[in-house]
Image (cartoon, grey):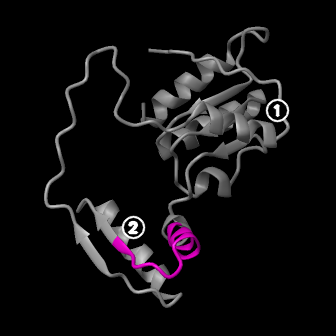
Amino acid sequence: DCQAETAGTIAHTLTAIPVPRRPVAVIGHPCSGAAIAAAPVYAEAGLLFMAAGARHPRLTYQRSAPLVFRLATREDRQASDIADLVRIRFAGHRVALVHDRSAEAQRLATGIEAALARHGIRLALREAYKHVPKLPELGPEDPGPFSFAWAERVHRILDEAGFTAIALERVDLS
């Protein structure tokens, strides 16, 4: 859920679980507003919090605690990070940029194009999709169309942070 109020309720529910059963880490809250609302609650309880898709700089710029992390690039750095990746991994190749016409995608495309231009790279093509295919109908038990975190990536991040004996357990609060 992307609502800040709901995220706060979920965070308080999780942190109220008695210690033997309380999770030691929370991975979730894909929207920035929800993650920013939940982060101080997890911080106060000493829980590791990894925001799955939150990109707002405030989540980690004004970090609630040393155990608050993001899995997505900050939105204010996203265009330059993508441009750096393209510049380094695809040096010497022609670059085409295709977006979906949404305001967010157009903003990102403009930022990527400008960041590439600062390094002397001109786009061979910048275009918007003409059609976006309709997603298939999902059943009530099907996972959503997006995935914000992969277990392997989360384990790698935890291992690098010194949390080597962590087991991931899914908790459904719906």
In the rendered image, residue 49, in percent from the top left (x then y), is placed at 67, 35
Tell me the CA gap for discs 2 and 1: 34 Å
Q: Is residue 94 magenta?
A: yes
- Which residue is under mark 1? 163
Quadrant of the frame with the N terminus: top left
Where's residue 155, x and y in %? 70, 33
Q: What x and y, as percent, mark residue 78? A: 51, 64
The residue indicated by pointer 2 is 108
Binning the other alpha carbons within 10 Å of mark 1 as few (below 14), some (14 to 19) or many (20 upward) gives few
Residue plotted at (56% across, 16% down): 171
x, y percentage for residue 165?
Answer: 82, 24
Residue 30 included in the magenta stretch of the image:
no
Instruction: Single out the residue that lies furthest toward the front.
Output: 92
What type is the residue that disc 1 sits on?
Phe
User: Looking at numbered disc 2 in the image, what kind of residue is underneath it?
Assistant: Leu
Question: Which portion, as a residue range, is magenta?
Answer: 82-96
- Residue 146 picture quarter: top left
Apparent side of residue 161 relative to residue 63 in the rendered image (left or right):
right
Front in this rendered view, residue 18 or 112: 112
Residue 62 figure quarter: bottom right
Give the side of residue 101 with respect to residue 17, left or right: left
Q: Residue furthest left?
A: 130
Secondary structure of the residue carrying tag 2 is helix
For marks 2 and 1, the one nearer the N-term is 2
Residue at x 34% of width, y 70% of height: 97
Residue occupying the point 53% across, 87% down: 119
Q: Which mark is residue 48?
A: none
- Vertical comparison of 31 with 62: above or below: above
How packed is label 2: few (under 14 Cα within 10 Å), some, or many (20 or more)?
A: some
**Callout 1 secondary element:** loop
